Image (spheres, rainbow, N blue to C red):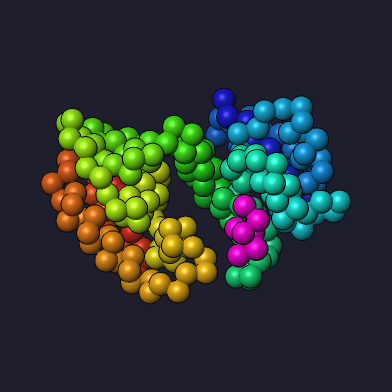
């Protein structure tokens, strides 16, 4: 069972998140601020952290920065009332893996938790499997039926990112930020070009397809 630490100074919200997580099959622990969270981490193995930003003693930014400075790569989902882009950018730069703005849809939160856990497992294994197709991170290759095809780095990372969460929609901006970097000046439409190349490469692949969600972005869908 995955163990999740909820770090939130609002006791009612903290307990709500805990109940929702436990209802969905997770073990949930609680901490009221960043320092309490670090204390819990000293005593318990944690698979994922859900953290508020604005907290006494140690805020969410400090917590995540402390973890990353110590080489701890536990996935962190930041949940906060702050919705300005600069606040979100600061969160990602501190090492946050995903971001949600209050009021939180708890069903969406559970979906994001599942995606982050799958991604963490995928990164540790450094491979992703879609049916009979295997993506190998270390070699930037895609293999099927004994045939191995190397991909250009950006194309591979784009496919690998979407393959980590089949069915999840990724916007152009999300892809740009993760693959090209937050400070990149590359035209976002370069994402469309890379998607087009991937579709051409894998048009006959029986395991997955890349679907355009008009006005939203792209997603990888497993074929039945």
In this view, 212 is above or below 161: below
Q: Which residues are magenta?
A: 89-95
Name the residue at 76% across, 27% down: 43
Q: Position of residue 72 (x, y in %)?
A: 65, 39
Residue drawn 77% across the image and 58% down it = 54
Magenta stretch holds residue 182? no
Q: Please say if 43 is above or below 69.
A: above
Q: Is 22 in front, or is 6?
A: 6
Residue 169 sits in which quadrant?
A: bottom left
Q: Residue at point 62% right, 46% down? A: 76
The residue at the point 22 percent across, 42 percent down is 149
Q: Position of residue 217 (x, y in %)?
A: 36, 63
User: Which residue appears farthest toward the left when viewing the image?
Assistant: 204
Q: Main secondary structure of the magenta part?
A: helix
In-image side of 190 versus 91 (left or right)? left
Q: Quadrant of the C terminus?
A: top left
């Amino acid at each position: 069972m995955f163990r999740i630490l909820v770090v939130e100074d609002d006791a009612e919200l903290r307990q709500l998140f805990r109940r929702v997580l436990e209802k969905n099959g997770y073990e949930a622990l609680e901490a009221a601020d960043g320092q309490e969270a670090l204390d819990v981490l000293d005593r318990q193995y944690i698979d994922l952290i859900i953290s508020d930003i604005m907290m006494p003693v140690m805020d969410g930014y400090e917590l995540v920065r402390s973890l990353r400075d110590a080489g701890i790569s536990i996935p962190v989902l930041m949940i906060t009332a702050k919705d300005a882009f600069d606040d979100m950018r600061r969160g990602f730069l501190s090492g946050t893996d995903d971001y949600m703005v209050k009021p939180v849809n708890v069903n969406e939160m559970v979906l994001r938790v599942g995606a982050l856990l799958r991604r963490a497992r995928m990164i540790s294994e450094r491979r992703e499997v879609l049916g009979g197709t295997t993506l190998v991170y270390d070699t930037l290759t895609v293999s099927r039926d004994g045939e191995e095809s190397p991909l250009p780095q950006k194309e591979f990372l784009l496919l690998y990112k979407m393959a980590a969460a089949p069915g999840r929609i990724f916007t152009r901006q999300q892809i740009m930020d993760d693959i090209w970097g937050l400070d990149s000046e590359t035209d976002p439409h370069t994402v469309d070009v890379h998607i087009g190349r991937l579709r051409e490469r894998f048009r006959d692949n029986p395991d997955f397809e890349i679907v355009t969600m008009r006005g939203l972005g792209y997603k990888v869908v497993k074929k039945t």
